[in-house]
Image (cartoon, rainbow, N blue to C red):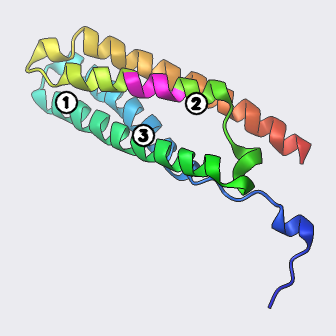
């Protein structure tokens, strides 16, 4: 039986949201790639891939939000909570992806080009910004410890 010192008990727990947050970023990045592939060759298979990737990204995004809400309740994850800017960017990303998913629900060329492609690119750029903002906070936390 291990005896924990008070400093071990107060150590930060692993946040549950960290398990789910990378999936939407990957799905939305691949959705941009499949939109570009559809723009280049017009094969409807790429439009279907984009629609499914957007749906999967949204599903995992909702799971990440639920896990993040659980992390807000857990006192041991307090040092690892994301900044308000990160949470706001994440909600904007999910909103854009939802609108993009509705755009991809149409048939044919006009479902993706030009508005679906622009929404995918905007979602991807916001994913990069959100990753940079989150990485900056975790880098400051790592140097503090």
Q: Nearer the viewer, residue 113 or 94?
A: 94
Q: Position of residue 144 (x, y in %)?
A: 90, 42
Query: Which mark is drawn over residue 46?
Result: 1
Label 3 – label 1 distance at C-alpha = 22 Å
Q: Are marks 3 and 2 in contact (CB under 8 Å)?
A: no
Q: Nearer the viewer, mark 2 or mark 1?
A: 2
Report the magenta stretch's main SS: helix
First-in-chain label (2 vs 1):
1
Looking at the image, the residue that sits furthest to the left is: 107
**Does the image show residue 18?**
yes
Quarter of the image containing the N terminus?
A: bottom right
Q: Can you tell which quarter of the image residue 56 is in?
A: top left
Left/right placement of residue 17 relative to residue 139 reads left
Left/right placement of residue 52 relative to residue 93 reads left
| Range covered by the magenta-colored residues | 90-95
Looking at the image, the residue that sits furthest to the front is: 73
Query: Which mark is drawn over residue 87?
Result: 2
* Residue under pointer 3: 61
Secondary structure beneath label 3: helix
Q: Residue at x 91, y 74 (%)?
A: 5
Is 98 situated above or below 119? Answer: below
Secondary structure beneath label 2: helix
Q: Nearer the viewer, residue 127 or 2?
A: 2
């Amino acid at each position: 039986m291990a005896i924990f010192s008070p400093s071990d008990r107060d150590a930060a727990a692993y946040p549950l949201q960290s398990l789910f947050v990378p999936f939407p970023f990957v799905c939305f990045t691949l959705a941009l790639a499949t939109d570009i592939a559809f723009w280049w060759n017009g094969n409807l298979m790429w439009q279907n891939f984009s629609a499914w990737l957007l749906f999967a990204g949204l599903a995992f995004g909702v799971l990440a939000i639920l896990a993040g809400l659980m992390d807000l309740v857990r006192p041991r994850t307090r040092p690892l909570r994301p900044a308000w800017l990160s949470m706001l960017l994440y909600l904007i990303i999910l909103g854009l992806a939802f609108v993009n998913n509705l755009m991809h629900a149409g048939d044919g060329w006009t479902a993706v080009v030009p508005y679906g492609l622009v929404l995918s690119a905007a979602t991807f750029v916001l994913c990069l910004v959100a990753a940079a903002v989150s990485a900056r906070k975790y880098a400051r936390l790592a140097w503090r410890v």
